[in-house]
Amino acid sequence: IVLLTERQPHHIVNKDEHFIFVELLAIAGRSSDAKRNLYRLAYENLCRLGPLKPTDLIVMLHDMPKENCGVRGGRMAADIELGFKVNV
C-alpha cells in the first residue's frame, strides 16, 4: 500500500520544490546496516527521477513490534510465520 500526500509549498519551511518526505512502517528487526542501506538506496533511486540534493530527502522509518501488526485475516504477526526474513 502506498499513500501519497502532497503538501503545499508554504506548509514546508526552508525546503524547495524538490523536497521529499518518505515515511515507512515496517516490522521491527532490521539491523542498523540494513536501514543505512535502505536510506542510501532511497536517495540514489529518487535521484534518478530528477535533481535531488541530500537536504531534499527525509526518510522516517517506524519499526513496529510484531505484536503491534495484524496481518492475514486479523492474526498477530508474532503468532505466524511471515514467510520472509525480518532480522537482516
Image (cartoon, helix red, strand yellow):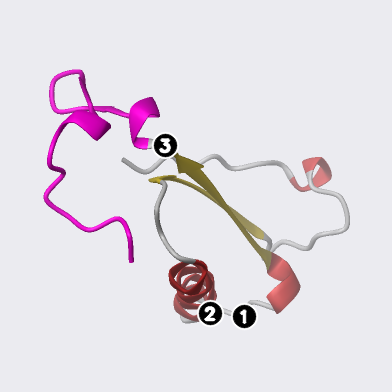
Numbered label attached to residue 47: 2
Question: Residue 75 location in percent, x, y?
Answer: 18, 22
The Cα–Cα distance between marks 1 and 3, rounded to whole angstroms, is: 36 Å
Q: Residues within 10 Å of mark 3 (few under 14, many from 20)?
A: few
Tell me the magenta residue range: 66-88
Numbered label attached to residue 25: none
- Residue 55 in the figure: left or right of residue 25: right
Q: Residue at x 68, y 61 (%)?
A: 19
Q: Residues within 10 Å of mark 1 (few under 14, many from 20)?
A: few
Question: Residue 65 location in percent, x, y?
Answer: 41, 37
Q: Is residue 14 above or below residue 43?
A: above
Q: Residue at x 16, y 44 (%)?
A: 82
- Residue 65 in the figure: left or right of residue 80: right
Question: Residue 36 location in percent, x, y?
Answer: 53, 73
Q: Residues within 10 Å of mark 2 (few under 14, many from 20)?
A: some
SS for dot 2: helix
- Asked if the magenta segment contains residue 78, the reply would be yes
The mark closer to the camera, 2 or 3, is 3
Question: Residue 71 location in percent, x, y?
Answer: 21, 28
Q: Are marks 1 and 3 in contact (CB under 8 Å)?
A: no
SS for dot 3: loop
The Cα–Cα distance between marks 2 and 1, rounded to whole angstroms, is: 6 Å
Depth check, front residue: 49 or 21 = 21
Residue lying farthest to the top in this orientation: 74
Amino acid on which the number 3 mark rests in the picture: Pro
The mark closer to the camera, 1 or 3, is 3
Q: Are marks 2 and 1 in contact (CB under 8 Å)?
A: yes
Residue at mark 1: 51
- Mark 2 vs mark 3: which is more N-terminal? 2
Residue at mark 3: 65
